[in-house]
Amino acid sequence: MVSFFLLVPVLLFLAWIVFGFEILSRLCKKLKNPEREVGFNMTLADFFLISFLISMSVLFGSSIGNRVAEVLTENESEQVFISMGVLHFIVVGAVFLFLKKSDSKPRLFWEKSAGFLKIALGSAGYFFGLFSLIALVSLFWNVALTLLGVEIEPQEVVEYFRDVDGGMKFFALFSVVLLAPLSEELVFRGVMYGGLKKKIGAGFAALIVSVLFAAIHFSLPAFMPIFFLSLLLIAVYEYYGDLRASMVVHSLFNSMTSFLMLAEEHLIDV
């Protein structure tokens, strides 16, 4: 009886993986006929402008965020999420300033917002189909690292998340689920991928952006799953031609990982 109950979730996970591969196959086929082509011809002036804005926003955003956090709380974990929230907010402002001042006038969103429901539901469907493949990549990657003798440790942000409670837990969720996907999609898929694609092609642009996106999370165990996630975010963005699609998928991914962390906390408390 015990073996039966253990077998059921394994079979369900395998079925989910098969379904994930089917969804991935359909997405790849649909990429041949995208809703709207993405990318823009980034000029040299645009490159220097966005480099300056992002550098200054990260520099001042981190400084301002740290000062605000130190005033509001003495808890290190709470300070981290307050600082992150301020940083994400300033980065978003910097990117929208770039979109307004840029010579190439990149369009990252559909002009008509009426299509957002279609985008949100479609991207959510792709996410729930493909999440099993992200989990599969994570499993094989962590097994490979373990065989190589690499110690598997959670990301620092996971430890910080576990250390906050009360109202700060809700702010941490707000930062992780909403602010982070908004700022990171604008920077990585919107500006970086969109600008590089026209210069070096979609394949190389996706590879470079995904490596950088995985690297900034500073976690070897999470590197390959995040790299694969970035490729999926680019694929969804390419298909819909609207950055809100990748924002929805990114937000759902962070929501799912946050839910799993909360569930783990509950089991530990029990």
Image (cartoon, rainbow, N blue to C red):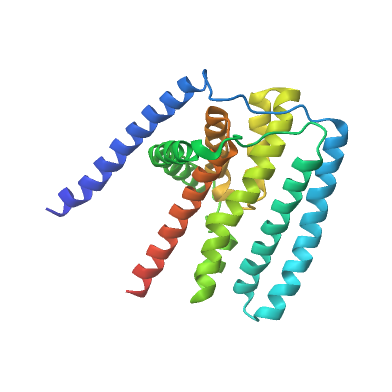
Residue 249 at x, y percent in the picture? 49, 43
The residue shown at (62%, 79%) is 75
- Judge by depth and name the residue closer to the eye, 13 or 164: 164
Residue 42 at x, y percent in the picture? 79, 30
Residue 124 at x, y percent in the picture? 43, 41
Q: Residue furthest left?
A: 1
Asked if one can make out residue 158 in the rendered structure from this viewpoint, the answer is: no
- For residue 42, above or below residue 246: above
Determine the image quadrant of residue 196.
top right
**Position of residue 207 in the picture relative to residue 250 (left or right):** right
- Judge by depth and name the residue closer to the eye, 167 or 10: 167
- For residue 8, above or below residue 81: above
The residue shown at (78%, 55%) is 57
Asked if one can make out residue 42 in the rendered structure from this viewpoint, the answer is: yes
**Position of residue 67 in the picture relative to residue 172 (left or right):** right
- Judge by depth and name the residue closer to the eye, 12 or 124: 124
**Position of residue 243 in the picture relative to residue 198 (left or right):** left
The C terminus sits in image quarter: bottom left
Q: Residue furthest top?
A: 32
The residue shown at (30%, 42%) is 13
- For residue 1, above or below residue 119: below
Residue 47 at x, y percent in the picture? 83, 37
The residue shown at (54%, 73%) is 168
- Judge by depth and name the residue closer to the eye, 157 or 116: 116
Q: How many marks?
A: 0
